[in-house]
């Protein structure tokens, strides 16, 4: 059963705490992405990775960090420097990026709330 | 920088009506235009992808068109059903990752 999984579904963060959102894909895709979605807004790109051990900042990378040690995994850490982290976080993957003609596939999302 | 705009932001129609959702983009040098569906609290589901060399794509009751010269794409939904109620987002891709519009929230009333 191929696809993208995200965990947890809901995550609660205390002030000053770093939290990590998990994203795993078994589609053998090279490219992976993290987006943030706020109510009534479109998706904004946080980070993306085209290949293992390489990633680039998106439009709103401040306060976030990522790693890409394995092709299947692209975890996102929301650091204490992100002052407004409450949002719906979506992970996606595609076979290639930057000019590729492939569809992006999305995970079910993680909703992050601040206590 | 690519900007994607969707109008209207929300739309309510009676069941059975044919409808059109609009998407406009500022950079005509896109490589593809994708339409997605999002149900409340869920991830995005890909509906249609139109490559830059194509003018339209069809899947069941859905038809998406692309006019690069005018910077427009439309999603046509035939014979709408209550199950079509969702938010529809378009996204343009080029030599950069996809840029998303804010979506059109569709309600189909039985």
Image (cartoon, rainbow, N blue to C red):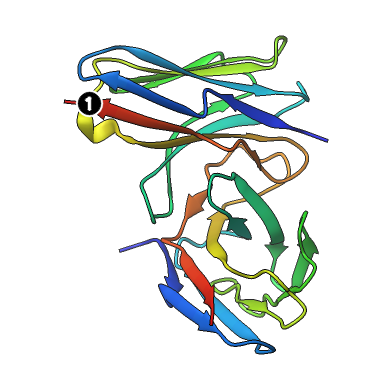
Residue A29, position as x, y percentages in the image: 55, 59
Is the residue A93 above or below the residue B52 in the image?
A: below
Q: Residue at x 57, y 18 (%)?
A: B73
Is the residue B97 above or below the residue A77 in the image?
A: above
Residue B14, position as x, y percentages in the image: 24, 18
To which residue does mark 1 refer? B109
Task: Give the residue at the far left of this rendering.
Answer: B110
In front of the other: A63 or A114: A114
Q: Residue at x 67, y 31 (%)?
A: B4
Task: Give the residue at the far front of this rendering.
Answer: A115
In front of the other: A101 or B87: B87
Quarter of the image with the N terminus of chain B is top right
- Report helix, strand or loop for mark 1: strand
Dot 1 alpha-carbon crowd within 10 angstroms: few under 14, some 14 to 19, many 20 or more = some
Q: Residue at x 64, y 70 (%)?
A: A85
**Which image quadrant for residue A92?**
bottom right
Residue B77 visible (yes or no): yes
Residue A43, position as x, y percentages in the image: 60, 49
In front of the other: B27 or A84: A84
Chain identifier of the residue bearing label 1 in the image: B
Residue A32 visible (yes or no): no
- Judge from the rendering whether residue B24 lies leftward or rightward of residue B105; answer left or right: right
Is the residue A35 above or below the residue B87 in the image?
A: below
Residue B71, position as x, y percentages in the image: 69, 16
Quarter of the image with the C terminus of chain B is top left
Is the residue A56 above or below the residue B64 in the image?
A: below
- Judge from the rendering whether residue A71 lies leftward or rightward of residue A51; answer left or right: left
Q: Residue at x 46, y 63 (%)?
A: A109
Numbered label tally: 1
């Amino acid at each position: 059963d191929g696809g993208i999984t995200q965990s947890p579904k809901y995550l609660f963060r205390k002030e000053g705490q770093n939290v990590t959102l998990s994203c795993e894909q078994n589609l053998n895709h090279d490219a992976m992405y993290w987006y943030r979605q706020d109510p009534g807004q479109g998706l904004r790109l946080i980070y993306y990775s085209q290949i293992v051990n390489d990633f680039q900042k998106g439009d709103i990378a401040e306060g976030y960090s990522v790693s890409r040690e394995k092709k299947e995994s692209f975890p996102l850490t929301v650091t204490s420097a992100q002052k407004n982290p409450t949002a719906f976080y979506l992970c996606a993957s595609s076979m290639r990026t930057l000019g590729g003609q492939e569809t992006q596939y999305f995970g079910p999302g993680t909703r992050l709330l601040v206590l | 920088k690519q900007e994607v705009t969707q109008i209207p932001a929300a739309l309510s129609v009676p069941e059975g009506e044919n409808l059109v959702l609009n998407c406009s983009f500022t950079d005509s040098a896109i490589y593809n235009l994708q339409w997605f569906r999002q149900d409340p609290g869920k991830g995005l589901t890909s509906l249609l992808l139109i490559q830059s060399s194509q003018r339209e794509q069809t899947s069941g009751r859905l038809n998406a068109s692309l006019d690069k010269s005018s910077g427009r794409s439309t999603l046509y939904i035939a014979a709408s059903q209550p199950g079509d109620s969702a938010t529809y987002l378009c996204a343009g891709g080029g030599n950069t990752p996809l840029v998303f519009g804010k979506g059109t929230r569709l309600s189909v009333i039985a």
